[in-house]
Amino acid sequence: MKSLIPNVRDIVNEYEIILDKKNPITSDDAMADRLYEASIELLARTGIYCQDTNRVIQLDRREILKSVQQFREGQARFGEGKDCRTFISRLPEDKTLPWLHLGTGIVASSEEIAMAQVEGYGSIFEANSVSVPAFSHVRGMPVTGGSPLEVYASIATVQTARKALWRCGRPGLPIMNLLSSSTTAMGTIAGSYPTFGLRPSDGCLIDVLAEMKVNYETLNRLAFIQIINGNIGSTAVPILGGYAGGAPGTALVKTAYYLVGMHMFQGTYHLTLPIHFNFGCNSMREALWVFAISGRAASRNTRYPAIAIGFAAAGPCTRMFFYVAATTILSQVPSGYAGIQTPHPAKAVVDDAVTPMEAKFTVELTRAITGMQAHQANELANRLLEKYEDDIANAPQGKKYQECYNLKTQKPSEEYIQLYDEVVEEMIQMGLSFK
């Protein structure tokens, strides 16, 4: 309260970081470069607060810059066998197709649904990696963090996902969201046992706490993954309207987290998104601007590959979901994000509320806009925002997997197929080329 908030406010003013709501997908390279320099200043002035020691971890400017310069891009490999890939960075307006990270960590109410979801993601040819669902229950009993059931749930999550990927012929496809069922370092360690858990070639997400904080649970996870030489994915979810303030302050903190990931976490990749304090999503134009300006700042000045995630207000099998997913992906691909993850439906808080159809749309839209200029993406995003912007607070929750898909055949309903085709045709009429 005495350090972070005043520093964010002062540095935003000093470096003239200004929100342009009319142009949420910005192409302002000068401001992006100022934002990057401002993020270094913020981290050097503020440091990272450790909750368990009540002390600030000071980060030296020269050490931060050295970590950026020495980042070894292209050294980390994800996956095994024919599904082994190298995850590398992109630049704004890059013509290289981003890394396609499909799926979510949304809770699945049963092993059957979780397996069907992951098999659906792995069956998409372009998938480079997957996120796997969390389990809320084991044998009908609710999973409580820190309990023995968390250990069982963490292990079951990986085993179920591996079986699903084996069934679709992609056993080497990497899991890159660590363990959604694990809330403690104990669960992470249990689910990473090499005989039946995560592999070193998977990705292990380690969170910076909002805002600019860590605790022993975070650092214990980090220490373990470093010891087993795993791929560390630094993770940051700044709160738009929280301690960082509005969009400019949130963009500043979001960009600083890249530096934390490279320097303090010694990460291999980064997972990033802003979340609106009141709405629990990033469907609005202020959040799109945060995505665009911070992605452009980091991709122009570092080689640290980042995966961006949209959180949609609307749920599956709704037209609004596809409008929101399209705007978030439009804010990410031209801004230089190295990876795109499936936008999470229904704010990622409704059990079973995700299907492979959203992952398919992510792939097809990302392919359609790769190489697009930011000003073109901005024009399309503004047209899409007109279709849903006033409805964010009352967005439709949509349907669950078992209402959209046949569990036996794992095929989408005719209703969802028809809606999907209508939305794709609408996007084509707006000028996008789906192949």
Image (cartoon, rainbow, N blue to C red):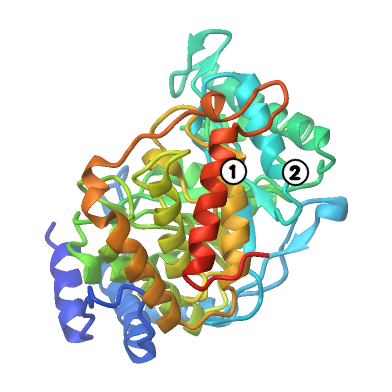
The amino acid type of the residue labelled 2 equals Ser
40 and 425: which is toward the camera: 425
Q: For label 1, count other residues whose C-alpha is less than 10 Å away and answer few (under 14), some (14-19) or many (20+).
A: many
Residue 427 higher or lower than 82, as above or below: below
**Residue 223 visible to the viewer:** no
Q: Is residue 190 left or right of residue 200?
A: left
Q: Is residue 111 left or right of residue 9?
A: right
- SS assignment at label 1: helix
Q: Is residue 413 left or right of residue 147?
A: right
Residue 3 in picture, x, y percent from top left: 16, 64
| Residue depicted at 32% across the width and 42% down the height | 52
Of the image marks 2 and 1, the number of the one nearer the N terminus = 2
Extreme residue in the bottom direction: 30
In this orientation, which residue lies closer to the viewer: 425 or 292? 425
Out of 343 and 392, give the one closest to the viewer. 392
Residue 326 against residue 35 in the figure, above or below: above
Residue 123's tag is: 2
Quadrant for the C terminus in the image: bottom right
In the rendered structure, find residue 333 and report the number of the disc placed on it.
Answer: none
Q: Residue at x 30, y 80 (%)?
A: 38
Q: Which marked residue is nearer to the observer: mark 2 or mark 1?
A: 1
Q: Residue at x 70, y 55 (%)?
A: 128
Estimate how packed mark 2 is, as few (under 14), some (14 to 19) or many (20 or more) residues with alpha carbons within 10 Å: some
* Disc 2 and disc 1 in contact, CB within 8 angstroms: no
Relative to residue 199, is residue 75 depicted above or below?
Answer: below
In x, y percent, where is residue 64?
44, 76
Amino acid type, callout 1:
Met
**Residue 35 vertical placement versus 338 (above, below):** below
Residues at marks 2 and 1, CA–CA distance in whole angstroms: 12 Å
The tag on residue 357 is 1
Image-quadrant location for residue 369:
bottom right
Image quarter where the N terminus lies is bottom left
